[in-house]
């Protein structure tokens, strides 16, 4: 548990890092004499690298193991934040934020793969929910923390404290992250030569997960597997679904940071940060629906069919709850913002959407891991790359979209798109066996069945 807790702590700080400048657009624009749209590049390209970085980290994970990857990534993360605090030009700061996003990305797609390594199938949804709780907490509590830091100190200080937190996590990782991945040597040991049980310090070795069998070839094969899995329909759908929820969350954060600072509200920056607590309440309320419930449904389905094999499609039944709540929350938020009502309505809508964001993310990612457990890391690279590309587009074009169509129309469109993508779960549920059989005929899953 100390291994997983430390990894989740890393995920929390990684997502705080991704949102640290969402509340500092105006101060950054003034400091570097750039427009607000260009200042959003600092968030947008950080988010992009947060997704693309997994294309490197996951193949490295297959060669070196997870523990070395986390340690190296934390060093990169801390160094990039130190760079950001000393940046004297917009280009230098942008480079620092992109490298920080690359380092932070190791706490993303690798984590569900670690969960699959460490926990049993009947606990997977519940255990995966701790990762998504940490991820969502970073997204929604990050603006609260950074709003106070930026208002009381400066945007440089926000990079400083995140870098210090990364250093603390590095120390914890040195002490507590054991290697969850190891290469089982298939051989028959004589009784007097059976290796001794590995000690605690033995598990902290950097070579436990090392794949010594043609490591360069293993890296390239993993990279190719990642590209192939982009053409697996469940993986692509999960990426689009999770990406849409992340993108719409960015829209809500950007509009809240802008509208509440202007008349008739005239809030201070820290009050905008406090507003994000409403979203975090939605995250807390989603913990059971997105975690324990999907385990309960999937486990009962396996018991009913008298099988120990995963039943990934059964997890999709839990999407009914966010289907009913999350898009409605978008509409409530948009209507209340457009009519400048009391902040309670916006907070209620924000909480409803955040409930769906966390629940849907965990349900969909657990579904993908169940479908392709052997290649969970590779599948989730594609999921998170798609997610972060959508987030990048939303961070760049939110202001233009709202200026052209108005917030009411934008949130209505967002709700309609959410309902549409959530409804794709119906054919995924009804034809899951045929879809998985089809994806077993090509790509890395074909290799799995050939080796069985």
Image (cartoon, rainbow, N blue to C red):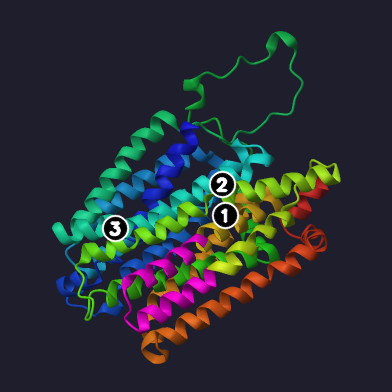
Q: Magenta part of the protein: which range? A: 326-355
Q: Main secondary structure of the magenta part?
A: helix
Which residue is the site of mark 1?
362
Around disc 1, counting alpha carbons within 10 Å, would you say few (fewer than 14), some (14 to 19), or many (20 or more)? many
Say which label, 2 or 1, has the lower sequence index.
Answer: 2
Image spot of residue 276 (x, y percent): 34, 62
Q: Image quadrant of residue 20?
A: bottom left
- Residue reaching furthest to the top: 192
Separation of marks 3 and 2 at Cα, in angstroms: 25 Å
- Circle 3 sits in a helix, a strand or a loop, which is it? helix
Say which residue appears at 80% left-offset and 65% top-offset.
431
The residue nearer to you, when weighing 447 against 424, is 424
Q: Is residue 240 visible?
A: no
Which residue is the site of mark 3?
144
* 334 shown above or below 230: below
Say which label, 3 or 2, has the lower sequence index.
Answer: 2
Residue 350 lies in magenta, yes or no? yes
In the image, taking residue 109 as reference, residue 120 lies left or right, namely: right
Q: Are marks 2 and 1 in contact (CB under 8 Å)?
A: yes
Q: Quadrant of the C terminus?
A: top right
Around disc 2, counting alpha carbons within 10 Å, would you say few (fewer than 14), some (14 to 19), or many (20 or more)? many
Image spot of residue 8 (x, y percent): 45, 44
Say which residue appears at 23% left-offset and 80% top-offset.
264
Image spot of residue 269 (x, y percent): 21, 66
The residue nearer to you, when weighing 398 against 59, is 398
Which residue is the site of mark 2?
128
Nearer to us of marks 3 and 2 is: 3
In the image, taking residue 162 as reference, residue 409 lies left or right, namely: right
Say which residue appears at 46% left-offset and 70% top-offset.
247
């Amino acid at each position: 548990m100390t291994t997983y807790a430390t990894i989740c702590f890393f995920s929390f700080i990684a997502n705080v890092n991704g949102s640290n400048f969402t509340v500092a657009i105006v101060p950054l624009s003034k400091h570097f004499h750039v427009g607000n749209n260009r200042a959003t590049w600092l968030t947008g390209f950080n988010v992009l690298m947060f997704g693309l970085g997994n294309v490197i980290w996951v193949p490295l994970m297959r060669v070196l193991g997870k523990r070395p990857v986390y340690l190296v990534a934390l060093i990169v993360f801390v160094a990039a934040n130190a760079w950001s605090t000393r940046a004297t030009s917009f280009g230098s700061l942008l480079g620092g934020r992109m490298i920080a996003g690359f380092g932070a990305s190791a706490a993303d797609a690798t984590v569900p793969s670690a969960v699959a390594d460490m926990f049993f199938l009947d606990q997977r949804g519940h255990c995966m929910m701790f990762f998504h709780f940490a991820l969502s907490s970073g997204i929604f509590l990050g603006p609260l923390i950074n709003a106070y830091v930026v208002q009381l100190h400066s945007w440089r200080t926000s990079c400083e404290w995140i870098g210090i937190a990364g250093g603390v996590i590095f120390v914890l990782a040195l002490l507590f992250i054991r290697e969850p991945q190891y290469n089982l040597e298939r051989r028959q040991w004589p009784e007097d030569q059976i290796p001794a049980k590995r000690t605690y310090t033995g598990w902290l070795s950097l070579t436990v997960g090392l794949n010594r069998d043609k490591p360069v070839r293993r890296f390239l094969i993993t990279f190719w597997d990642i590209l192939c899995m982009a053409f697996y329909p469940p993986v692509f759908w999960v990426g689009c679904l999770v990406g849409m929820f992340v993108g719409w969350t960015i829209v809500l954060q950007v509009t809240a940071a802008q509208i509440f600072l202007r008349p008739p509200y005239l809030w201070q920056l820290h009050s905008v940060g406090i507003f994000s607590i409403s979203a975090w309440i939605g995250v807390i309320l989603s913990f059971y629906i997105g975690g324990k419930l999907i385990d309960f449904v999937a486990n009962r389905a396996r018991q009913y069919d008298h099988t120990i094999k995963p039943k990934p499609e059964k997890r999709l039944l839990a999407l009914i709850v966010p289907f009913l709540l999350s898009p409605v929350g978008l509409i409530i938020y948009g209507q209340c913002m457009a009519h400048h009502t009391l902040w309670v309505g916006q907070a209620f809508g924000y909480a409803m959407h955040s409930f769906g964001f966390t629940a849907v993310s965990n349900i969909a990612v657990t579904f993908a891991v169940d479908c392709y457990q052997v290649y969970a890391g590779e599948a989730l690279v594609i999921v998170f790359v798609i997610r972060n590309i959508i987030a990048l587009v939303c961070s760049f074009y939110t202001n233009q979209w709202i200026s052209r169509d108005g917030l009411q129309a934008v949130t209505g469109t967002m709700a309609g798109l959410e309902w549409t993508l959530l409804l794709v779960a119906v054919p995924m549920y009804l034809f899951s066996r045929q879809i998985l059989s089809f994806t077993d005929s090509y790509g890395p899953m074909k290799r799995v069945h050939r080796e069985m």
